[in-house]
Amino acid sequence: MEQKNGSSFTGFILLGFSDRPQLELVLFVVLLIFYLFTLLGNTTIIALSHLDPHLQTPMYFFLSNLSFLDLCYTTSIVPQLLVHLRGTDKSISFGGCVAQLFISLGLGCTECILLGVMAFDRYAAICRPLHYTVVMHPRLCALMASASWVIGFANSLLQTVLTFLVPLCGRNKIDHFLCEVPPLLKLACVDTTANESELFFVGVFILLIPVALITVSYGRIVRAVLRIKSSAGQRKAFGTCGSHIMVVSLFYGTAIYAYLQPSNNYSQDQGKFVSLFYTIVTPMVNPVIYTMRNKDVMGAMKKVLCRGHDSR
């Protein structure tokens, strides 16, 4: 990398919410609580999926993958953000910024693909119930989950390399609370139209193709459910999909807003709060959505708690 691009930097300055010092203490308390609930909720999902034999199915295999992903995602961002909110030093090393961008972007892209895979699992469960165990074979589940991680981090590697090849000419103040592609491109001292076009194209691929898969899957699910004559059967079928639809709506809605809009319409302040939502709020509410609306998970939780109480 050229001298002017970053090798002479001691690091970057993440401005974050420093222009609103009265907001920093409030955000610190709120985000700390959210982070603790994220750790608790997602760890609980992973533990229950491994402890209860009834939850060792493709659906909960993918859900435990999602929970592990959310744990890593928030941990790559929140601890440093909490330190910056309570201190005067807002710096991050050059290597730290590269690592944060690579890891958080890789995990975000992986989640996009994984949510599409989970929609296919629900399609197979409802539209092909007699062949479900054959279609969703453990090897296929492992392959689809692995493909999600590989594609997500391959895209992240490409985006990270292209972003940090852009000359910055000594600029190191990032108007954001984390290292993310759009605010980093704003530091460039050259035309970044090609980078923005490439980012938009890849964003369409990573975001909209899974959305299309989810839409097609749920279109067929709705058609199959409407053929069920009993209202109880319809409610049960829709209940298994409701949690996933809520998670998809929360995650994709904010991610599409952040990455698939023209840069001249991109408000940095709005971008910060949108990023807070899909990097911190969504990973926290995912376990709540899946546990509160799922009798199997609630039942497994009660069994584990009762077993722990009886062993005393």
Image: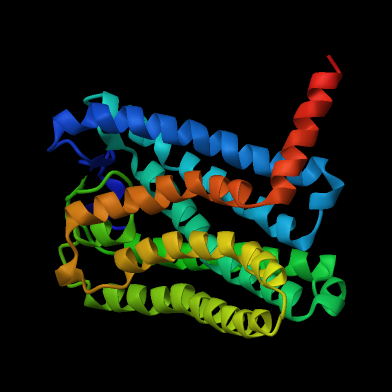
The residue sitting at 22% across, 76% down in the picture is 193
Residue 95 position in % (x across, y down): 40, 44
Residue 19 position in % (x across, y down): 12, 38
The residue sitting at 22% across, 74% down in the picture is 262
Q: Is residue 30 above or below residue 130?
A: above
Q: Residue furthest left?
A: 19
Q: Residue furthest top?
A: 312
The residue sitting at 68% across, 76% down in the picture is 123
Instruction: Decide if residue 202 is on the left or right side of residue 12.
Output: right
Q: Nearer the viewer, residue 297 or 268?
A: 297
Q: Nearer the viewer, residue 291 or 35?
A: 291
Q: How is the image coloured?
A: rainbow
The residue sitting at 45% across, 78% down in the picture is 208
Residue 38 position in % (x across, y down): 52, 39
- Marker count (numbered): 0
Q: Is residue 211 above or below residue 19?
A: below
Q: Is residue 266 above or below residue 228?
A: above
Q: Is residue 233 above or below residue 285?
A: below
Instruction: Decide if residue 310 is on the left or right side of residue 173.
Output: right
Residue 166 position in % (x across, y down): 27, 64
Q: Is residue 241 visible?
A: yes
Q: Nearer the viewer, residue 312 or 277?
A: 312
Quarter-of-image position of residue 188: bottom left
Quarter of the rendering occupied by the C terminus: top right
Q: Is residue 89 visible?
A: no
Quarter of the rendering occupied by the N terminus: bottom left
Instruction: Decide if residue 198 is on the left or right side of residue 39.
Output: left
